[in-house]
Amino acid sequence: MNITKNQRGFTIIEIIIAIIVLTVGVLGLVTTAALVTRMIARGQRSATAAAFASRRLERMRAVACTAAQRVDGQDTLYRGSTWVAVNTWTFTNAPNQNFRLKVVTLYKTIKNRVRTDSTETTIPCNVFG
């Protein structure tokens, strides 16, 4: 039997090692894709809650200089029958006829956990005569 040294091809061990390396790489990509998907979903929930708080803050800024409208309160954002975010706002007196408005937003994260963010601003109500 003649065995030549210049035979071309891969040995079975080389093929098995290549398959193992490829499998590890593909598993790493799948894990990363799942992580990125969760991060995108978290960002969307956070952005929805921030936009909801921003709308409330702007509505309250427009009426804050009227004493009858300057009351603490709460409202809830729903998607269907499920709540998504809850805003709670409070006013406090600041010097020189200014008022501090704080909007605290509670929103759902994954597995029905909640997170709280807050936004705060000063509203000047100086009247020059």
Image (tube, rainbow, N blue to C red):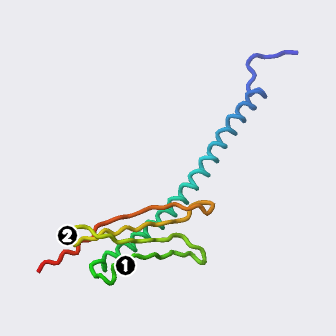
Mark 1 — residue?
71
Tell me: 13 left or right of 37: right
Q: Nearer the viewer, residue 27 or 108?
A: 108
Q: Nearer the viewer, residue 36 or 63?
A: 63
Compared to residue 15, the image places residue 126 above or below, namely below
- The local secondary structure at tag 1 comes to loop
Q: Residues within 10 Å of mark 2 (few under 14, many from 20)?
A: few
Percent across and percent down for residue 30 are 64, 48
Q: Residues within 10 Å of mark 1 (few under 14, many from 20)?
A: few
Percent across and percent down for residue 95 are 22, 67
Percent across and percent down for residue 58 are 34, 74
Q: Amino acid at mark 2?
A: Asn
The image quarter in which residue 5 lies: top right
Residue at x 76%, y 27% (from the top left corner): 13
Q: What quarter of the picture does the C terminus occupy? A: bottom left
Q: Which mark is residue 89?
A: none
Mark 2 — residue?
96
Residue at x 41%, y 63% (from the top left corner): 118
Q: Earlier in the sequence, mark 1 or mark 2?
A: 1
Residue at x 31%, y 68% (from the top left corner): 100
Compared to residue 33, the image places residue 2 above or below, namely above
Residue at x 64%, y 39% (from the top left corner): 25
- The local secondary structure at tag 2 comes to loop
Tell me: 78 left or right of 120: right
Q: Amino acid at mark 1?
A: Val
Q: Nearer the viewer, residue 24 or 31?
A: 31
The image quarter in which residue 9 lies: top right
Q: How many marks?
A: 2
Q: Nearer the viewer, residue 89 or 9?
A: 89
